[in-house]
Amino acid sequence: MDTLRAMRVFQTVVQSGSLSSAGRQLGLSAPSVTRQIQALEEDLGARLFNRTSRRLALTEAGELYHRQVEQVLQQIEDARASVANLQTVPRGMLRVHTRVLVGMRFIVPALPHFLAANPEVSVDLLMSNFAVDLVDRHVDVDIRIGQLADSSLIARKLASSERIVCAAPAYLARHAAPVGPADLARHNCLTYRLNLGRPVWRFLDAAGALTEVSVTGNMQSDSGPALVAAAVSGLGLALLPDWSVLDELREGRLIRLFPEHRASHMEFENGVYAVYLDSRRMPTKLRVFLDFLAEAFRTRLGPIDPPPRG
């Protein structure tokens, strides 16, 4: 017996006052309604209705059962409406993981605007420099740098990127500016600690020729914000994602060097991606957040204008 279906039939019989009327409302025959009520009574071991030729009347057991059934059916309807509402109105906790540099440069500054526009959403923001297991950490979306390895996850590209060599005016005042990649071997280069090997920076010129330079320096770090800050302080040259130093370039606190040489992506691709679980029914809060981030990146990554001189 389908107990929930039988409950709904019972409820309709009580409300309509007859088996035939309930059948018409439910699209069932009167005998089918009768069988549903009889199955309920057999399951409960109690008579639910006193039947006469003119009317149906609830027994004491029927009255008790009806009160409980009303509550159960209302709770089921409330649960259905709550879930349906989640799919139409953004609400609930959104758990976001991001690389530290992306988080500090884009996610955190954008959150006030997102939360103001979606007051029923709250954000739990996690930041580290490692990919996380979305299932184990209950993460809705992970903001990553670089293409996604083959997996069951979905990746939406938020921004394209390239790495650029830059330095502070203070550093260039003390050292002759490099005019091409080969000159980097004579400079203090701030490097991102990807492995234990010697850092190698690779570049392609306009003709596609590859130049590889083994660089050295007195600082390495696994923190993007630390490398940006060190470069701005004049400690050395840094190879950084262009989106990570937009303000520094526009304000003249960093200067891009030899832009005619493009950093090669042999080690990794630098696009920014939102990674999430494959789902045919994406929660509205996540869909709205992804759309918001995509627009925020498009707005933020405008052309980099040099600061006014003089």
Image (cartoon, rainbow, N blue to C red):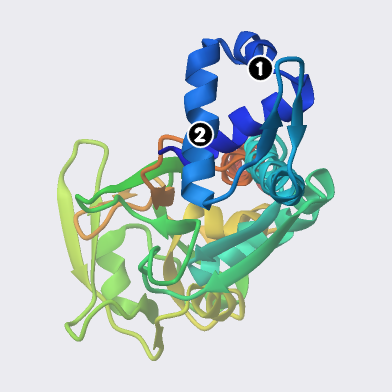
Does residue 146 appear to the left or right of 157 in the view shown? Answer: left
Measure how far apart labels 1 and 2 are at the Cα level: 15 Å
Q: Nearer the viewer, residue 184 or 11?
A: 11
Does residue 200 appear to the left or right of 280 in the view shown? Answer: left
Q: Nearer the viewer, mark 1 or mark 2?
A: 2
Residue depicted at x 49% and y 77%: 227
Query: Mark 2 — residue?
Result: 38
Residue depicted at x 64% and y 44%: 76
Figure check: 254 above or below 69: below
Query: Residue 285 in the image: x percent, y percent?
Result: 63, 45
Kind of residue sitting beneath label 2: Gln
Q: Residue furthest bottom?
A: 218
Q: Secondary structure at mark 1?
A: helix
Figure check: 91 above or below 241: above
Figure check: 215 above or below 54: below
Query: Residue 175 in the image: x percent, y percent?
Result: 47, 77
Location of residue 241 by image quarter: bottom left
Kind of residue sitting beneath label 1: Ala
Q: Secondary structure at mark 2?
A: helix
Residue depicted at x 46% and y 37%: 39
Query: Mark 1 — residue?
Result: 22
